[in-house]
Amino acid sequence: MFDYFIEFMQSMVTFFYDITADFGFPNYGIAIILFTVVIKSLLFPLTAKQIKSMKAMKEIGPQLKTVQDKYKNDKTAQQKAVADLYKETGINPLAGCLPLIVQMPILSGMFYALRSYKYLSHPGFLWIKNLSAVDHFYILPILAALTTYLSSKQSSMATSENANPAGKVVVFVMPLFIGYMTLHFPAGLGLYWVVSNLMQIVQQRLLQRKELAIS
C-alpha cells in the first residue's frame, strides 16, 4: 500500500512539473512548492481546528492552574480532575496535534518519493544542484529549523503555559530536531518542509486575526 502511495506522490510532483513546463519554465523546485501549497490548502480545515483548540486551552488556563494547585500532592487525583475539566468544557487537548499527525504520512511519502525520484531534467532549484541530494550549502536545514521555530512559537503564544507546560520544550527542541534531520534529507523534502512551515505561519496568522475580529 505504501509503495502505491509513494508512486502517487511522485505522480503528483510530475503533474505539477508538467504544469510548469506548459507555462514555459519547467522546474521541479516550483513543482514541489505548488504541491505543498495544495496540500496545506487541503489541510486548512484541520489548521482552523487546531487554532480553535489552542484558543480554548488558553481560555481554561486559569481553571487548569487551580486544579493543578489543588491536587499538586496527588498526581492521580490531579489527572482525574484535569480529565474531568476537559470533559466538562468539551476540549480535546490532542486536537492541536491533529494537523501534524495527518501530515506525517505525507511527509514520509514525500521522503521516499523524492529520495527515489527520477529527475529526467531540470533537477536543480536556485542554489540547489540536485533536489534528490542533500543541500551542501546547509541553507535548507537552517531555514527548516528557523521556520519550525517560528511556527511553534506562534502556536505556543496562543496557548496558556499552564495548559501546556511542555510547550516551551517543544518550541526549542523540535526546530533543532527538524534542522538536524534536514541535513540528511533530500533537498526536495527540505524545500517541502520549509514551504509547509511558511504556509502554516500565514494560515495561523489569518485565523488568529479572524478570531480577534470576531471577539
Image (cartoon, helix red, strand yellow):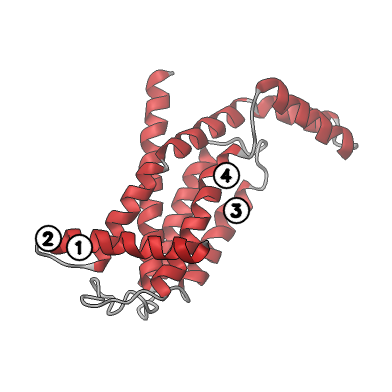
Q: Earlier in the sequence, mark 1 or mark 4?
A: 1
Disc 3 to disc 1, C-alpha distance: 39 Å
Q: Which residue is mark 1?
A: 18
The image quarter in which residue 119 lies: bottom left
Instruction: Between label 2 and label 3, give the one nearer the viewer.
Output: 2
Disc 3 to disc 4, C-alpha distance: 12 Å
The numbered dot on residue 97 is 4
Residue type at the position of mark 4: Cys
Q: Residue at x 51, y 45 (%)?
A: 99
Give residue 153's position: percent from left, percent from top.
50, 47
Q: Which residue is mark 3?
A: 170
111 or 64, which lies in front?
111
Disc 2 to disc 1: CB gap under 8 Å: yes
Q: Secondary structure at mark 2?
A: helix
**Can residue 167 be seen at all in this image of the molecule?**
yes
Dot 1 crowding, Cα within 10 Å, few <14, some 14–19, many 20+: some
Q: Is residue 213 above or below residue 175?
A: above
30 or 182, which lies in front?
30
Give residue 101's position: percent from left, percent from top.
56, 49
Disc 4 to disc 2, C-alpha distance: 38 Å
Q: Is residue 209 above or below residue 3?
A: above
Q: Residue furthest left?
A: 24
Residue type at the position of mark 1: Asp
Instruction: Between label 3 and label 4, give the one nearer the viewer.
Output: 4
**Can residue 143 be seen at all in this image of the molecule?**
no
The numbered dot on residue 22 is 2
Relative side of 47 to 79, left or right: left
Disc 2 to disc 1, C-alpha distance: 6 Å
Q: Earlier in the sequence, mark 3 or mark 1?
A: 1
